[in-house]
Image (cartoon, rainbow, N blue to C red):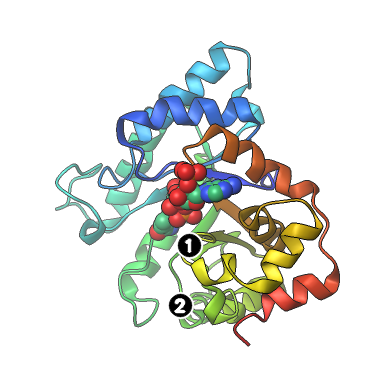
Amino acid sequence: MQAPSFLYGTAWKEDRTAALTEQALRAGFRGIDTANQRRHYVEAGVGEGLAAACRAGVVTRADVFLQTKFTYLPGQDHRLPYDPSAPLSAQVAQSMASSLEHLGTDHVDSYVLHGPASAQGWSPYDVEVWAAMTKERDAGRTRLLGVSNVSLRHLQQLVASGAEPPAFVQNRCFARAGWDRAVRAFCAERHIVYQGFSLLTANPEALRHPVVLAAAARSQATPPQVIFRFARAVGMLPLTGTTDERHMKQDLASERLTLSDDETHAIETLAG
Ligand SMILES: NC(=O)c1ccc[n+]([C@@H]2O[C@H](COP(=O)([O-])OP(=O)(O)OC[C@H]3O[C@@H](n4cnc5c(N)ncnc54)[C@H](OP(=O)(O)O)[C@@H]3O)[C@@H](O)[C@H]2O)c1
């Protein structure tokens, strides 16, 4: 399994994390995104939800694509999964060991650098962390690697450094930037799977746009379903963080909608 066609995101769920993770698996999600960043995620809750779903016979570990992240110190609060005075490569190893404990597994399917050290470019810190993440992959603790919150420049510099390219890029996807057009094009050329988050929350104007409303009316779907279907049509792997059982079902059902090429193109170019 490279990755399923939808990821359920577990950020901002606090003490509901375990119950919502289990509910998402019961609803049919087979991909779960989390992070070892207590500030925004309860990774141990994801492990509890997965264990409950396994105990209930809903899934086995092998059915589920589990993705977590390494987060640099500035992105963390005081609840750290590593010794902040240790070298970065040791922080990666400690964070991964802690993730595997939280998630109750001996490997994850994807390990993502939550964000580069600097917005300006791929820095020597990132080079060290990426090498450490690659070691984790070589040791079998993750199958695949990814990067998040990256610009085209970050990706170009990562590749130019001679390092192995990521299997995934996970970015906030703004319609006004052509749905991250430049980064998506870079990914498509290199068979990197682009994971889009905040597809709904970052794009309220797209949800109200006549093109989206017309496609929703034609296909008897909701505007959020049209956006998720559009995301798939242009090759994205979408994330949803819904806390509503009905929306979980709707988000998954969006895969069965059909959008014409004209509708897809019109949505892709809403902002030019
Ligand atoms: N790499 C990063 O830095 C980063 C940053 C942010 C997020 N993420 C990941 O991405 C995941 C998703 O985050 P997100 O920002 O895309 O989503 P989100 O903030 O969790 O929010 C999704 C929103 O859309 C609504 N929604 C979902 N499906 C809907 C539907 N069918 N109809 C109507 N409303 C619907 C939800 O409301 P209801 O709850 O009422 O359905 C919620 O308000 C996170 O949990 C996290 O795993 C990663």
Task: Please provide percent x and percent y for residue 182.
Answer: 59, 81
- Quick one: label 1 or label 2, which is nearer the N terminus? 1
Residue 83 lies, in percent from the top left, at 18, 46
Q: Specify whether 99 is left or right of 229.
A: left
Q: Disc 1 on helix, strand or loop?
A: strand
Tell me the crowding category of disc 2: few under 14, some 14 to 19, or many 20 or more residues within 10 angstroms, Cα based: many
Q: Quadrant of the N terminus?
A: top right
- Residue drawn at x 45%, y 77% is 154
- Does 21 appear above or below 83? above
177 relative to 72, above or below: below
As helix, strand or loop, the secondary structure at mark 2 comes to helix
Task: Find residue 54 and report its horizontal and vertical position in percent.
Answer: 56, 17
- The foreground one among 1 and 260 is 260
Examine the rendering and report whether any part of residue 112 can be seen. no
Compared to residue 217, the image places residue 188 above or below, namely below
Q: Residue at label 2?
A: 154
**Picture residue at 56% right of the left edge, 66% below the top:** 164
Task: Check residue 147 in the rendering and tell me which mark sits there, or answer none.
Answer: 1
> Badge 1, how many Cα within 10 Å: few under 14, some, many 20+?
many
Quarter-of-image position of residue 207? bottom right
The answer to whether residue 7 shows anywhere in this view is: yes
Q: Is residue 53 left or right of residue 12?
A: right
Instruction: Tell me which amino acid carries mark 1.
Output: Val
Labelled pair 1, 2 in contact (Cβ < 8 Å):
yes
CA gap between label 1 and label 2 equals 10 Å
Where does the image place residue 46, in percent across and percent down from the top left?
43, 31
